Amino acid sequence: MNGIVLAIVSVTVIGLICAVVLSIASKVMAVPVNETESKIRECLPGANCGACGYAGCDGYAAALANGEETKTSKCIPGSDGVAAQIAAVLGVEAEDVVEQVAVIHCKGDCDVTHDKMDYQGIESCKAVKLFYGGRGSCTYGCIGLGDCAAVCPQDAICLEKGIAHVDTRKCIGCGLCAKTCPNHLITLEADTITCQVTCSNHDKGAQTRKVCTHGCIGCQKCVKNCPAEAISMDNNLAKIDYSKCISCGTCDDVCPTGCIMEADFRGVFNKDK
C-alpha cells in the first residue's frame, strides 16, 4: 500500500514541477503578439484559399499589419464586408472588392461527346488524367469525377451528365476548384460577365467536331461579328477580352456550335442585385 501511495505522490510532484517549468518557459520564451495582425485575422473568413495571393489568411493578415501589403480588397471570399472591417482596423479608406465566380470552360456532357474507354480505378480526375489524358474522347474537357466539387467549401459545384457545373449563386470565388482541376478548365472571372466560352479544345475544328459537337471549331464568326472587337482566336479557340466586352450577346447568337453561352453569372454577394 505504501508503494502505491508513494508512486501517486511521485507522479503528482513531477506533474506539478513540469507545470511550473512550462508556465515559466511560456512567459520567458513568449513571442510578442502583433495586436493589429490579430485583429485583421479575426476579420478574415479563414478559408485559407490563397485567392489573396498569400498562403492563407495568416499570411495576408501579417502582410497587412507589417505594411508589406496595402490592398485591403484582396480577400475575394470576404467581399466588401471584410474589406471594410480591415480598413477600419488599419484606419484607411475601404476599397471595393471585385467579386469573382468560378467559370468552367467545358460543356461537353454525355449528350455531345463520348468516352473512349471504360475506366475502372480511383475515382479522381487527377488519377484518370494519367491514363491517356482521361476517359473522354476530348482530352481537353471535363473529366467529371468531381475533384473540384470535393474541395468546394460552399457546395457550389455539382456533377450532371458527366461534367461539373458551378452554381454561381453559391460561389464565393475562393479559387480552390481552379487549383484542383487537372485540365485547368476553371478560371475566376468577375461576376459581372454575361458570356463565356464553354470549350477548352485547341485542336483544329475538324478534329474538335469528332470528339465533341459542342466544341469551338475556330470558324471565327464570333470574332467577325463582335461589335466591340472583344473576341480573338487563341490557338484555334475563341477568347473573350472582358475589358472590351459590352455584353451584347452577338457572339452567342452567331456561334454555330453554341459553345459561347450568354447567362447571368452573378455570385453569392451580388445575386440579389
Image (cartoon, rainbow, N blue to C red):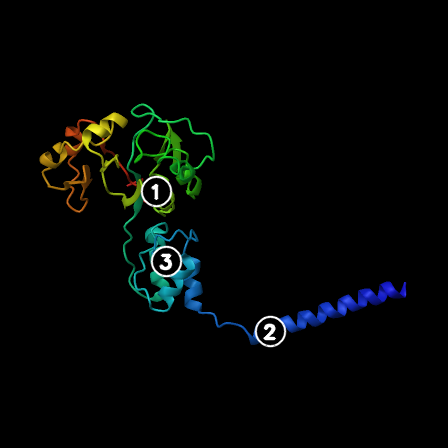
Q: Which mark, residue 25?
A: 2
Who comes first in sequence, dot 3 or dot 2? 2
Along the line of sight, the residue nearer the viewer: 215 or 240: 215
Who comes first in sequence, dot 2 or dot 1? 2
Number of other residues with Cα within 10 Å of mark 3, as a class: few under 14, some 14 to 19, many 20 or more:
some
Query: Which residue matches tag 1?
Result: 268
What is the x, y in percent for residue 164? Answer: 36, 34
What is the x, y in percent for residue 264? Answer: 26, 36
- Whether tag 3 and tag 2 are in contact, CB under 8 A, the answer is no
**Quick one: SS at disc 2?**
helix
Q: Is residue 66 left or right of residue 199?
A: right
Residue 258 visible: no
Residue at point 85% right, 65% down?
Answer: 5
Q: Quadrant of residue 22?
A: bottom right
Residue 69 visible: yes
**Residue type beneath disc 2:** Ala
Number of other residues with Cα within 10 Å of mark 2, as a class: few under 14, some 14 to 19, many 20 or more:
few
Q: Is residue 242 left or right of residue 160?
A: left
Query: Which residue matches tag 3?
Result: 54
How far apart are the two marked residues, 3 and 2, measured between alpha carbons? 32 Å
Residue at point 30% right, 48% down?
Answer: 99
Q: Give above or below for 163 relative to 9.
A: above
How far apart are the two marked residues, 2 and 1, measured between alpha carbons? 47 Å
